[in-house]
Image (spheres, grey):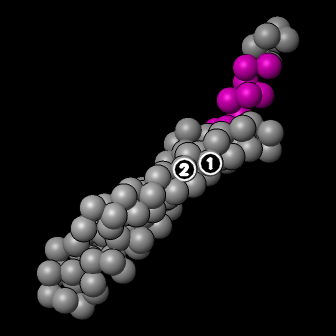
Amino acid sequence: MSSEHTHTTDHAEEHGETMTKKKIWQVFFVLLGITCVEFMIALYLVPHGVIKVNVANPVYIILTLAKAFYIVAYFMHLKFEKVGLIFSIVVPVLFIIGLILVLTNESHHWIDLRL
């Protein structure tokens, strides 16, 4: 075998061994479960007054971030990458989330001033 073929085979095995059909289905069912919980909250718990909207919204955000983690970690193979690459993606995303939270808080301040 040539060294080029061995290199690509090693790279494929590195990712292939960790993402078996069983693991893909496990991740699929985790994502399906999280989505079902989101739908149950949105279509039953909030309309029937079991959970208030101000409690449901942060729960939606947390569940959506959990789904995003599973998609990025397993289907985009980020879980199998080196730590430097992970931090180069995660840190800017955290800053963007923080910026969105600060801007949302600031927008409420400006709305309150108008009243």
- Residue at 77% across / 28% down in the picture? 10
- Residue at 32% across / 67% down in the picture? 112
Q: Quadrant of the N terminus?
A: top right
- Residue 11 lies within the magenta run: yes
Where residue 105 sits: x, y (%)?
Answer: 45, 62
Where residue 12 sits: x, y (%)?
Answer: 68, 29
Where residue 5 sits: x, y (%)?
Answer: 75, 13
Tell me if residue 55 comes above or below residue 110 in the rendering. Answer: below
**Residue 25 is at least partly visible in this image:** no
- Residue at 85% across / 11% down in the picture? 3
- Residue 105 lies within the magenta run: no
Q: In which image quadrant can residue 55 be found?
A: bottom left
**Front disc: 2 or 1:** 2
What is the three-letter code of the residue carrying label 2?
A: Leu
Residue hosting label 1: 95
Q: Secondary structure at mark 1?
A: helix
Where residue 75 sits: x, y (%)?
Answer: 52, 42
Nearer to me, 62 or 97:
97
Q: Quadrant of the C terminus?
A: bottom left
Q: Secondary structure at mark 2?
A: helix
Residue extent of the magenta highlight: 7-18
Q: Looking at the rendered structure, which numbered label has been put on residue 99?
A: 2
2 left or right of 94 in image: right
Check if mark 2's residue and mark 1's residue have beta carbons within 8 Å.
yes
Tell me if residue 20 comes above or below residue 44 in the rendering. Answer: above
